[in-house]
């Protein structure tokens, strides 16, 4: 039964990318879980090299991007971020997905997102939902400064809006 629940939640998260969504949705930062209300999410993620780390330990400026490598909206945002790397150069950027197909490396290469400050990490769906709440749309961006949530944005975001918030 537990496996069925995990599979259903994963399908919901990975299926959050739909072609009929509006091009841009920007929502106010309303923490969806108590952990977010206090700052960085308490979530252990797996890095590309197989090691693990806790997002709770990150300090400074952090941009967390929940995405799906197959999502056309996420792919467009990846391209836009690649074209505007100057605005994220002072941030630690973490692309987070529950994707089990290991497509993060391909996504990083396809969108030229191979930089010392850009990381691709994974975690299972249930811990993601426990740490940051439900993700209804991908991509979803979380901007943190000094471990405090500044803004949560769902859907495609204009680079002008993102630049203004960063």
Image (cartoon, grey):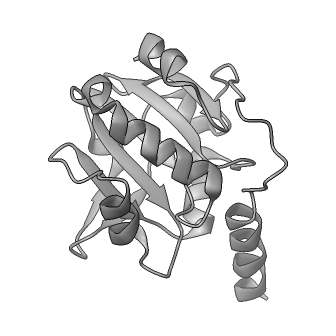
Position of 80 relative to 159 (above/below): below
Residue at point 45%, 28% (across, down): 143
Say if residue 41 shows up in the picture: no
Left or right: 105 with respect to 75? left
Name the image quarter holding residue 43: bottom left
User: Which residue is found at the position 68% from the left and 71% from the top?
Assistant: 10
In the foreground, 5 or 24 = 24
Q: Position of residue 26 (x, y in %)?
A: 68, 24
In front here: 137 or 124?
A: 137
Whether residue 161 is visible here, answered yes or no, is yes
At horizontal 62% and vertical 30% (from top left) the residue drawn is 153
Q: Position of residue 9 (x, y in %)?
A: 74, 69
On the rendered structure, is 19 left or right of 51?
Answer: right
Compared to residue 57, the image places residue 75 above or below, namely below
- Quarter of the image for the N terminus: give it: bottom right
Q: Position of residue 2 (x, y in %)?
A: 73, 84
Vertical arrangement, residue 116 with respect to residue 83, above or below: below
């Amino acid at each position: 039964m537990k496996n069925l629940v995990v599979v259903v939640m994963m399908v919901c998260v990975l299926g959050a990318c739909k072609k009929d969504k509006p091009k841009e949705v920007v929502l106010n930062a309303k923490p969806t879980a108590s952990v977010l209300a206090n700052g960085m999410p308490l979530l252990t993620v797996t890095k590309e090299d197989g090691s693990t780390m806790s997002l709770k330990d990150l300090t400074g400026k952090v941009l967390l991007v929940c995405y799906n490598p197959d999502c056309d909206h996420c792919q467009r945002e990846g391209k836009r971020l690649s074209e505007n790397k100057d605005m994220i150069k002072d941030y630690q950027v973490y692309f987070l997905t529950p994707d089990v197909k290991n497509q993060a490396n391909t996504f990083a290469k396809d969108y030229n997102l191979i930089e010392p400050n850009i990381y691709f990490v994974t975690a299972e769906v249930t811990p993601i939902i426990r740490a940051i709440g439900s993700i209804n749309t991908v991509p979803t961006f979380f901007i943190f400064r000094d471990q405090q949530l500044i803004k949560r944005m769902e859907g495609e975001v204009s680079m002008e809006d993102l630049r203004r918030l960063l």
